[in-house]
Image (cartoon, rainbow, N blue to C red):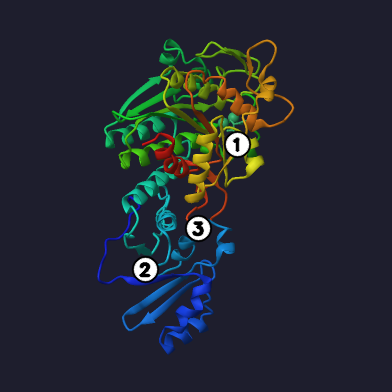
Amino acid sequence: MPLSFADSTKNSISLYLLDEDAAADWIKNQTEDMQNWANTNGFTGSLGQTLICPGSHGISMAAIGYGNAISRKRGRFHLAAGAVSLPKGIYSLNHTLDPERLTVESIGWLLASYRFDRYKKQKPMPAKLIRPIGVDSELIEAIANGEALTRNLINTPASDMSPTDLEAATRDMAKNYDASINVITGGALLEQNFPMIHTVGRASDSAPRLIDLKWGKTGPKLTLIGKGVCFDTGGLNLKPGTSMGLMKKDMGGAAAVLGLAYMIMATDMPIQLRVLIPAVENSVSNNAFRPQDILTSRKGLTVEVNNTDAEGRLILADTITLADEDDPDLIISMATLTGAARVAVGPDIAPYFTDDADLSEALYQASQSCADPVWRLPFHTPYETMIEPNIADLDNAPKGGFAGTITAALFLRRFVTNTQRYMHFDIYGWQPSDAPARKKGGVGQGTRAILAALPKVLKL
Ligand code: BES
Ligand code: ZN
Ligand code: ZN
């Protein structure tokens, strides 16, 4: 079921979103009975607090506390924080939010109603919100549903999200939006010169593949690349059990770019979009690639495999090479690429790399306005020596333990030569515990920020 607003109805319940400063005045303006009710309930308008006012036919109205500027800084989707505890009903929001904030809060409401119910029926959120006015509610629905797609893809375990399944999911989406799709699978990867995608994925029963989706006939060219490692065992340099525990999410980059592609296509953005997903499973088998193997990439650069667990950069390198051959206006890669990114910024923030200061600034501003936190990390060129072993051009797993997210990003940048603007995100793709509108599980990062930045970045 897509996430959506309710259409306006006579039986809606007024829902007041009240700043802590405004709550006392609001209470004073109510009937005496209601004032007593609010005070008895201790309603002060603190963040996420709810007040349900009884009437002769059920609920007469309701209020959600919006806290204050300081308490709001501690979270992102504040309306959602209260909305989840409202009783069943259709609510019309009474608020003083500016359109930007209303957009964020409305996205939050829809995302609070997201459920992953493929394997077990889940109780739906009881409250529905009437389509908000003064904002683009269809854009909001597109964003929420793109995010829901990302979450569904990540949450689905590898038993049902193999490279074959990821291809099927992409084809489903392509069909809905009349996008064209081309997939290079198994041995054909070798014939068409994608050696590293084949090498990483060849040990799995689900053949490695490169998914290539194209949509849109005119406008600037945007190419999105997502790491699609459907499960990352680490390969022969096997991950310990605790590190492997979450590795169904190692296709989080693919899931994120597919969610973003959904948003772009559903809102009919005037761009030429290409989505490239190298989809593989990093498995252990007699034909698995080995530590110290030296691979020759599509670009011709040789890579010494010093850890088969640094597989993401290998499959991305061949994919970036293909993207770069077309010289698009912008390439964005998204990947659950390193554990080091999580150590640096934790699960909430999406670190990104780009050499383009204007692009970076546009993204950062957009991220601030849509509650999708990102943070720039440097493509620090002096660290290039860390990814240079002496018997091959590149080392996929530098020793020393320094700046792992930066060295991974530098590795990818080596494969961009024609394209002027490149941006890379090292995302975590997982919400570790329940938060408003962010249920524990798969989550998109950076996608809403990118979507919001595109008009400026691509001069649409
Ligand atoms: N998929 C992992 C990175 C990862 C781990 C992301 C945990 C999020 C959470 C990736 O393939 C990997 O294992 N990278 C190694 C690289 C190292 C061997 C150079 C890492 O980060 O430890
Ligand atoms: Zn790995
Ligand atoms: Zn991985």
Residue 194, given in percent of the width and then of the height, sits at: 47, 16
Dividing the picture into quadrants, the one containing residue 223 is: top left
Q: Is the residue marked by circle 2 packed among few (<14), some (14-19), or many (20+) residues within 10 Å?
A: few
Check contact, mark 1 vs mark 2: CB within 8 A. no
Q: Which is closer to the viewer, label 3 or label 1? A: 3
Check contact, mark 2 vs mark 3: CB within 8 A. no
Q: Earlier in the sequence, mark 1 or mark 2?
A: 2
Residue 147, given in percent of the width and then of the height, sits at: 42, 45
Q: Is residue 259 above or below residue 106?
A: above
Residue position for label 2: 88
User: Which residue is located at x 62 percent, y 45 percent?
Assistant: 346
Q: Is residue 226 above or below residue 189?
A: below
Mark 1 to mark 2 CA distance (whole Å): 40 Å
User: Which residue is located at x 28 percent, y 33 percent?
Assistant: 175
Q: Quadrant of the C terminus?
A: top left
Q: Three-letter amino acid code at disc 2?
A: Lys
Residue 265, given in percent of the width and then of the height, sits at: 32, 38
User: Which residue is located at x 46 percent, y 60 percent?
Assistant: 80
Mark 3 to mark 1 CA distance (whole Å): 27 Å
Q: Which is closer to the viewer, label 1 or label 2? A: 2
Task: Return the residue found at the far bottom.
Answer: 32
Residue position for label 3: 436
Q: Is residue 443 among the parts visible in the rendering?
A: no
Residue 209, given in percent of the width and then of the height, sits at: 43, 23
Residue position for label 1: 244
User: Which residue is located at x 34 percent, y 67 percent?
Assistant: 92
> Callout 1: helix, strand or loop?
helix
Q: Earlier in the sequence, mark 2 or mark 3?
A: 2
Q: Three-letter amino acid code at disc 1?
A: Met
> Callout 3: helix, strand or loop?
loop
Comparing 143 with 84, the one in front is: 143
Q: Earlier in the sequence, mark 3 or mark 1?
A: 1
